[in-house]
Amino acid sequence: MIGVVGGGQLARMMAPAATALGVRLRVLAEGGDVSATTAAECVVGDYRDLETLRDFAASVDVVTFDHEHVPAEHLRALEAAGVNLQPGPDALQHAQDKLLMRQACDRLGLPNPAWAAVTTVDELIGFARRVEFPVVLKTPRGGYDGKGVRVVASVEDAEDCRDWFGLGFEALLVEDLVEFSRELSAQVARTPSGTTASYPVVESIQTDGICDVVTAPAPGIDPRTAQAAEEAAVTLAEGLGVTGMLAVELFETPGIGPGFMVNELAMRPHNSGHWTMDGAVTGQFEQHVRAVLDLPLGATDTLGAYTVMKNYLGGANEDLYSAFPAAMAAHPEAKIHAYGKSVRPGRKIGHVNVVAPLAEDLAAAREAAESAAAIIRDGHRAQNEPRTAAADDLQEQS
């Protein structure tokens, strides 16, 4: 049995992949109403409590993660007690702590932006003057989807960050603001026995710090850059001892180094890999299950020339299922994935995948994904369309 710490949408989407392989999956969920509770066997508990983690780990064969927020000292204690953690704390710390991640990229010879650990506003200003404003200030732990990130464009901006130095971190991470053409993501799976399987490098469009649209493979990418990015992801997976899925978020920098710089790491299935659910022979959730169980990895070949993934966020429509018929009718080629979450403005509540069979179909695929997501977000149910019991049931889950 696989145990997943965290009950978000990633755990939810691991469940059908595990079921298809005949594997049981149990989730340590933060509450009784989180995303995974409608798709998997769940126990409710606090992942920040060591005894809760010990009890949960004792009920499963291997423990993996929906997020990176389990305290590092708890992971060390579980490892010392013989718990099978995939990935283990030696690897996971590099996704938990951005300062450690930057150090590891330097050690492995991978392209980093200029960076420093700073403990005072004066050190922040000193770094910014050396590389020239603007710079990016980040909390080393706990940030995601644009949280814990601040652009510092002047001395005055730096002074406004003074309260960040009282957040309890030993140091903050400051980086040169990279001039990049677009954001990319390279994903690789690795098993405990050391086999790896890479997916094509994708383009990731961020809106307000949140992944918005992913196109796989990245259109127009220099083949040398794509190969170097895939190799960098494998280097990180092997060099850090990652098991399961690894997503390496990148800045594309044409003409500089290998054509990219490392941005951040995630050691789990990742938003930039949701396209694989419908656009690759083996989706990332199945691949993660295979990897943590040390099973042979699946093929990563694409099923079309391109796949477009579009997230839909909480908007005007609180009754998601009511809009599904209109979205399905308008775009029968779209594959709709809902996360079972209540609707809040700006909250990730699902995504849409559309496969472009031929390269010339990319624009139509992008338009279909955008349109289907908009219909669901805004709510366009056919007039007088009757509600069904199934619709009411799904609304309760959402």
Image (cartoon, rainbow, N blue to C red):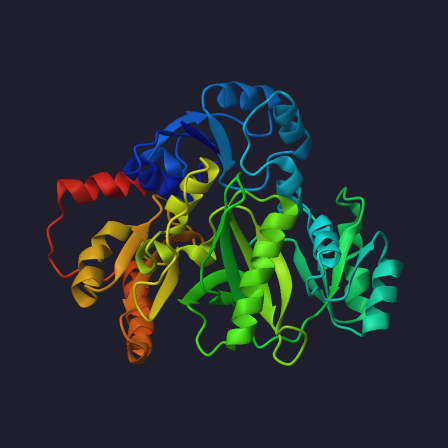
Q: Nearer the viewer, residue 340 or 113?
A: 113
The reply, left or right, for residue 156 in relation to residue 333 is right
Q: Quadrant of residue 44?
A: top left
Q: Please identify the quarter of the rendering in which residue 369 is found.
A: bottom left
Check the picture and name the quadrant holding the N terminus: top left
Is any atom of residue 147 visible in this view? Answer: no
Q: Residue at x 65, y 49 (%)?
A: 239
Where residue 100 appears, as percent x and y from the top left, is 72, 49
Residue 257 visible in the displayed image: yes
Say above or below: 16 vs 237.
above
Q: Where is residue 220 shown, x and y percent of the image? A: 46, 79
- The front one of 339 and 75 is 75
Q: Quadrant of residue 16?
A: top left
- Residue 281, given in percent of the width and then of the height, sits at 32, 55
> In this image, 353 relative to 390: left or right?
right
Q: Residue at x 29, y 66 (%)?
A: 355
The image shows residue 197, relative to residue 292, as above or below, that is below
